[in-house]
Image (tube, rainbow, N blue to C red):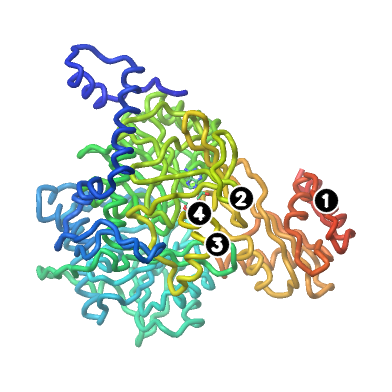
Amino acid sequence: MFNNFKIGSKSCALMVETGQNREPSRDEIYHMGLATYRDLYSKSIENPEEFWEKHSEIIYWHRKWDRVLDDSKAPFYKWFVNGKTNMCYNAVDRHALGNRRNKAAYIWVAENGDEKIITYDGLYRRVNNFARALKNMGMKKGDRAIIYMPMIIESITAVLACARLGIVFSFVFAGFGSAALADRIKDSGSTMVITADGGFRNGKIIELKKIVDDALEETSTVNTVVVVKRTGSEVTMDEARDVWWHDVAKDSPEAIEPEWVDSSDPLFILYTSGTTGKPKGAVHSTGGYAVWTANTLKWAFSPDENDRWWCAADIGWITGHSYIVFAPLLLGLTSVIYEGSITFPSPGRMWEIIEKYRINMLYTSPTAIRTLMKFGEDYVRAHDLSSLKVLGSVGEPINPASWKWYYDNAGNYRCPIIDTYWQTETGGFMLAPALGIGLPPLKPGSATFPLPGVDPVVLDENGKEVADGTKGYIAYRKPWPGMFMTLNKDPERYVKAYFEKFPGMYNCGDYAIRDSEGYFWILGRADEVLNVSGHRLGTIEIENAVIASGGVAESAVFGRPDPVKGEAIVAFAVLRNGNESSGEAVARIRKDIRKQMGPIYVPDEIHIVGSLPKTRSGKIMRRVIKAVALNQLPGDISTLENSASVDEIRDAIDSFMKESS
Ligand code: WT7
C-alpha cells in the first residue's frame, strides 16, 4: 500500500479536530480518511433523499425540483423531478457575473506553443455571441447539432452555446472518419454541423471540413454548417449551406437569456461502441448530470480555488465532456487545455506544459503514461514538476508497474493517484479514491471504493453475488444522478444491453474482483468490446469496416494484449477476389478504414487467409481464432467445421512474427 504522501489540508483538519498541536501520523490520517469516507458513503446509501437534497445545491436551480428521484418507470429514471435549470448558466454566468469574472476559465495551449487565456467573462461573451448566432440561424430548444471540432476554445464555446439554448449537441471526436460521422449525423437527426477548416495534430493538419463534406453526401438532414477558421486550409464553402463562424458570431453587448430546461431534458448525446455494429447514442440529462459531474470532481480530486487542472483528454470523449468542459466550469476552476499530441514536438511535451503552467492536477490515461514511460525518465527529470499535487488516471485498468512509474516520476512520491473507473454511460466517476472526502490507503491498480451514491456488486453469471476475491461481473444496484437516460431512438436496446442480464441492476460490461478489504479491481471488458488506448471499439464494428472496405468476404477481429495501448486490433480477412495480392489488399483495407472510420479503428495487424474457422451453422469462431493467434489452447473446437482454417491462422501468425522480428 502506498501512503507516504503529504495531504496538507487533511492533516490540518485532524489537528483542528483532535485539538492536538502536532502533525498527525500517517496512520491517523488514513484512519480519519477512511472513516470520513465511510460515514458520508453510508449516509448516501441509507438516506439518498437527504443526501441529494444537500448535494444538488452545488448548482443553481431556476425552479427547485419536487422529488429527488422518480423510479416509477425504471430503468428510465428521472432525477430532480420538475427541477428547472440551465447548464450554461451554471457553468459560465454564475462566475462571469460574480466574483470569478476575471479568473481564467481556460489557458489554451496550441501545439505550436501559442497560448490564449480566456477569463470567465471572456467565455461569457463568446458563448453569448455564438448562442445569438445559433438563434439567428433558427436553432432552438430540442434541435440537434453535431460538433466535429479540434481542441480549440470554439469547441467549448459551441458546446456551451448549445447548452444555453437547450440544443442537444452530439460531439464527434475529430479523429473519426466520414462514415462514422455520417452515422452519427443520421442517428442524432442533426440539422446543423459545427466544425473547423481543420485541426493540428503531430504537426500535421487534419482537414475536418473535407470530411464533413464527404459525410454530408451520405445524409440529408443537415441544412447549416458553421466553420471555424483554424488552420487556414483551403475549403469549399457551399453558399446555400456553409457559413464561417467569424461571420455569424459577432460581438454584441446583448446577452442571450438561458433556456430554463427541465432537469431531465437531454443535454447531449454521445456515441459509444457496443456489441453490435451500430454505435449506441447515450443520452445524458441536464440536472442529474450537472450535479453528478460537479460533485464527483470535488469528491475525487478536491481541487482548490486557485489550482490549475489539466485533463489531457479530447473534448470528443466523455472524459472531455465531463472533466474538461462541465465539471471544472461548474466548480469555477481554471483548466489548462492542450490542442495537440502529448509527444509532439518532443516526448517531453507533457512535462514541459506542467512545468510552464505550474499545473497542480494532471488527469490522463494509462496509455499516455505507458507511452511516456517508454521514452524514459530523463524527459521527466528535465522538468520541475513540483507544482503537481494530485495525479489522475482514466480509461483502462492501470497496471501496477505504470502506476508506480507515474507515482515515482511524475508525482515524485508525493502525489496520490486517483484512478477513476467510469464509462460514457455513467456520466462521471463511479469508483475512485475520494481525496475530497477521505483518502483511503492506495493500492496500485485498484480504483478503490465507490463514490457516494454508487452501489456496486460483483456477480456471477446467474446474478448471484460472488465471494470477495472472486472474479465476476460488476453491476450497480442503484441508479445515480449522472447516469444516461436512454439510448437515442433505441430505448429497447437501452434495457436489453444494460438491465436485462441482472434485472434491476445496471450491468457495466466489465469484469471485476472485490478484495477482502472491499477494494475493487477492474479486470477489463466482459463483452465483445475492445479497449484500445482507453477507447472503446466494438469488434463487430471493426469487422464491418474491414468488410465495407470492399473486396473482403468475411472478417474476424479481436484484441491482442499490447504493452502500450492495452489492446491492439488484430483482423483476419478472407478476400472475395483470389487474384488480389495480400499486400495490396492490406494496404487498401487500412487506407479505407482510416478514411471511413478514423485512424483509431485501423487494425494493427491484418492477415489475409483463405477461410476462417466456423461452426457447422456457419458462425465464425472468433474465440478459436483469438486463442490460436495468441498461442493459447483454443478450448472446445468440437463444433468446428473446417479444421484446416485453424492451421492457416497459425501459419499466418507465424509468418507475421517472422516478418516483424
Ligand atoms: C470502459 C468505458 C471513462 C472515460 C473513458 C472511457 C474501461 C474506464 C477505467 C479504470 C479500469 C476502466 C472500462 C469501462 N475503464 N476507466 N479506471 N479502470 N477500466 O470511457 O469509452 O465509455 O469506456 O473503459 O472497461 O467499461 P468509455
Q: Quadrant of residue 374?
A: top right
Do the numbered discs 3 and 2 sit on residues whose CB atoms are within 8 Å? no
Mark 4, residue position: 507
Q: Residue furthest right?
A: 644
Residue type at numbered disc 1: Ser
User: Which of the numbered marks, if any, corresponds to residue 655?
Assistant: 1
Q: Which mark is residue 461?
A: 2
User: Is residue 525 something that shows in the picture?
Assistant: yes
Q: Earlier in the sequence, mark 1 or mark 2?
A: 2
Mark 3 secondary-structure assignment: loop
Secondary-structure class at tag 2: loop
| Residue 635 falls left or right of residue 521 | right
Q: Answer with mark 3 or mark 4, whichever residue precedes in sequence.
A: 3
Label 2 neighbourhood size at 10 Å, few (<14), some (14-19), many (20+)? few
Above or below, comparing residue 37 to residue 536 in the picture: above
Look at discs 1 and 4 and give the one toward the viewer.
4
Say left or right for 587 vs 169.
right
Q: Which residue is mark 3?
A: 274
Cα separation, mark 1 vs mark 3, equals 32 Å
